[in-house]
Amino acid sequence: MINIAIVGGGPNGMYFLNGLLSVFKELKISNNIGITVYDKYGYFGSGWPHSPAQAKTSMLNRIVGQISFAPDKTNIASHYFPQSTRITFNEWLKKKYQTTQNERYSLNPDDFPTRELYGESLVEICQDLINEVRQAGIDVKLVKDTVKHVKKAEGKYQLFRESNAGADEFDLVMLATGHQESKNNFYLAASLKEYVEYYNFAYPLFDVPDWQNKRIAVIGMGLTSIDTLLYYTENKGGTFYRDQGKLHYTPSGQEPKKLYALSRSGYFTYSRPHNAKEVDLAKYEHQGYFFTRPLIDRLRQNVGQPAHPDSSTENHALQLDFDVHVFPLLILELQLCYYRILFGPEVLSIMIAESRPLVEQFIACNRAFNSQKESAINWLTQATERLAREAIFLIRCFLNDGTTASFHGVPVETLVSRFVYVVSAQQTTTPGDVQNFALAALAQQSPWEHKRDPEAHLFNWDMIVDPIRLMDFTAETPWRERLLAFMHWDRRQSEQGNLDNPYKGACDDVFRDLRQTVVYAVDFGGITPASYNNMLKDFYAVHNRAANGNCIALMEKMEALIEADVVDVTYAQANIQIQNQQVWLHSLSDAGKYTRVDAMIDAKLHNFSVMKARNDLFRDLIEEGIASYWVHKDQNGVECSASGFNITRQFQFINRDGKRERFFCVGQPSEGIMFFQNGSIRPNVNHHVANDILACMTSVKNELQTLLTGQQKQVSLTS
C-alpha cells in the first residue's frame, strides 16, 4: 500500500489530486493507493480564503472568464486528466444557472465574482473529483485538521496533527498550504502587542471583540485590507446606494467607531481596468516586443555575473541585476505599449525599429549602457522619448495651425485621429476635416477625464509609482481629498478599459501579460541577491498596486466609505508611536494630526518565510533534514535575505544532503527560489500555475514508479 498526503485542501490541493489521478491512470494503478487530504477548516477544494462561508462582500480580483480548475490543451496536458475538472468557471456558472435559474449564477465572462461564489464552485468540483478518484479504486480520506509537525523514520514521513491524534505515516507528501500566518511579520508587531489588541493575520475574517466601540487600524491597503474594511461595514449591515450617478454609503450603526487604513505608500491598490482582451486573447494578449525569454537568455549569457559556488545547485550559474538589466527593459516595454495605445500601431512600428539597435547594443555587454540603472533606462528609451516628443509637437502644430506633416512616413492626421479618440472617445467620420473635428472633440469634457493637451500625455513612470505627487493640489489640501480625487480619476481610467487607456493598457500588457517573463528572469537565483531584495521591496509593491488591484465597483465602494467618514485615510502614511502605554497614529501626510487606536489588524499577505511561519511544520522540515534552505549568493558572498526552501524545478524538496525527497510543494511554500507563486489556473493561455502542477507531477510520477518497483521486488522476495 502506497500512502500519499496532500497537506492543504484549497485550490492547489485540488490541483494535486487532479494530477495524481492522471498519473494513476497513466501508470494503470487502480488499487493499493491511499490519499489523505488535510484542511484546517474542512473546505476541501476552496480552503478558507475562497470558502463558501466567506463574507459575500469579499470579491475576487479576477474576472469569470479567467478562471478554470485544471490544465488544458494549451498546457500540453495529459489526455489522462480527469473529466470532473474539465470545465471552466464560466461554464460552471452557465450550468448552474440553467439548472437553478438563480440570478447569483448569471454572470458574464468579464464580471468579477465574489470569493464565496468561486468557493462554491471549487467545493462542488472538488467533490466530483474525489468521487472520480474513488471510482477509480483509490481510497481518499478527508481530514479536517492542521498538520503541525513532521518526522522521518525508515523512509516514511510521519505527520502529526493539531488534534494530537498520533502520527499518520506516508510514503509521499505534497504541500499545498497556501498563505501562512507569520509570527510578528510587521516590524513593530512585538512591541505593539503589549499595548494594543494586535491581530497578526486577517484570515479567516473575524470580529474584534466589542468592535463597535473601538478604533481599529488596518495595516495594508491591498486586497486583504479591502476585504477587511468591507467585512466591518457592508457585511455589518451598511448599504451602498447611488444618487445622481454617485455612490454613497449609509452606516448601519454596527461599524467600528473608526476604521483607519494604513500603508507605506498611502495608496489603495489601483482599480482593475475593464478587460476587453477576453474577446480575442490570441490578438490582444501581449507577447512582448523586446522583453521576451530569448532576450533574457542572451542578456544573461552576455552580461550575467557568476553566482557564488555555495549557491543552491538549482540556481542559475550567471546572475542578472534586476535594477540595471531587467527593470530598464520593462520601462522600454511600458513606453512602447503606452505609445501604441496613444498614437497607434504605425507609430509603434517606428519606435520598435529605432529601438532595436539600442537593445542589441544593450545586451551586447557594453558596460557604458548597462552598468547603472538610470543610464540603462536613458539608453534604452532614447528613441521612444525622442519620437514621442516629435509626435506631440506635430500634433500640437496641426491642432493650432492645421499644419500637415509626415511623421516618418505616417500622415500626422493618423496620429491626431488616434490621440483624439483616446482622449474623447470620438472618431472622425469626415477624413478631410480632421482639424475641425479634433478641435471640437477636444473642446468637450473627456469622458475619461483626460487632459486635452498632447503635452500632458508623455509617459511618466511616476504616474504609476506616485501619481498624486503629479496632480494639481494646493499645499493645504488634506491627504483624504488628494486620495479621493486620485481614486475617482483612476476609476475613470479603468472604465476606459485595457485596450484604449494608455496607462491601464500598458500596465496590463507588461505587469500582467509579461509577468511570467519577469518570473523567468528572476526564478532560481536569476538575479543578484541585492537586486532581488530591492525588487521585492520596491518593484513588487508597485506591480501589485498598479496591476493586481480589484474591480472598479469595489474601489468605488472604498471611495464611498472614505467620504462617509467610516474609513479614515488621514493616517494612511502613518508614524506609529507608543506613548504612555497607548498606540498612536501620527500622520506624515497631514501635519499636526494624530490619534489613538484600540486594535490593529495586519491585513497584508506577507512573503513566505520558513523562520517566521507560525506553523512549526515548516521549521520541522529543516530540522529533520527533509528540506534545506535555499542559498542565493553573488560572487562576493552577498546573500539573499529570503528564508525559503531549496527545491528542484519540479517542486521537489532537496534535503540537507543535497538529495531529493518524496516531498513536494506548490504555491506559497515554493516562494523564495521561485517568484510569484500565488494564483488560480487560467484557461486557454498555457497558464504558469497549470504548468507548475504538470512539472511537479512529472517528478511525482517518477517517485511513484520507484515505489511501485520496490513493492514488486518485495512481493517477489516473499513469494
Image (spheres, helix red, strand yellow):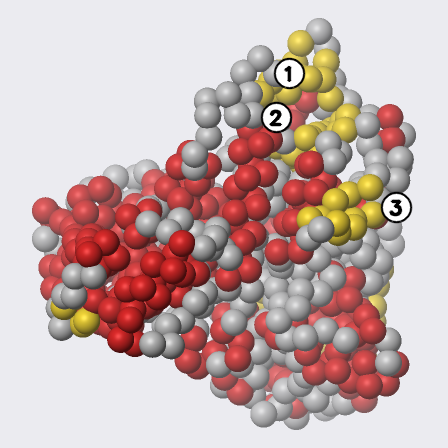
Q: Nearer the N terminus, badge 3 or badge 2?
A: 3
Residue labelled with disc 1: 594
Residue labelled with disc 3: 237
- Foreground of the two, 658 or 206: 206
Whether residue 388 is visible here, answered yes or no, is: no
What residue is shown at x 22% (from left), y 42% (from top)?
A: 374
Looking at the picture, how far across and down is residue 699, in whole percent?
Answer: 53, 74
- Secondary structure at badge 3 equals loop
- Secondary structure at badge 1 equals strand
Residue at the farthest top position: 580
Q: Amino acid at mark 1?
A: Tyr
Looking at the picture, how far across and down is residue 180, in whole percent?
Answer: 66, 48
Q: Amino acid at mark 2?
A: Tyr
Tell me how many marks there are: 3
Image quadrant in which the C terminus is located = bottom right
Whether residue 593 is visible here, answered yes or no, is: yes
Looking at the picture, how far across and down is residue 96, in whole percent?
Answer: 81, 81
- Secondary structure at badge 2 equals loop
Give the answer, above or below, for where 549 lies relative to 297. Answer: above
What residue is shown at x 47% (from left), y 53% (from top)?
A: 445
Give the answer, above or below, for where 107 lies relative to 551. Answer: below
Tell me how far mark 2 sits from mark 1, CA to CA: 8 Å
Choose top left, top right, bottom left or bottom right for residue 600: top right
Give the answer, above or below, for where 16 lies relative to 424. Answer: below
| Residue 134: numbered disc | none
Q: Amino acid at mark 3?
A: Gly
Image quadrant in which the N terminus is located = bottom right
Residue labelled with disc 2: 571
Tell me how far mark 3 sits from mark 2, CA to CA: 26 Å
Say if mark 2 contacts mark 1, CB within 8 Å: yes
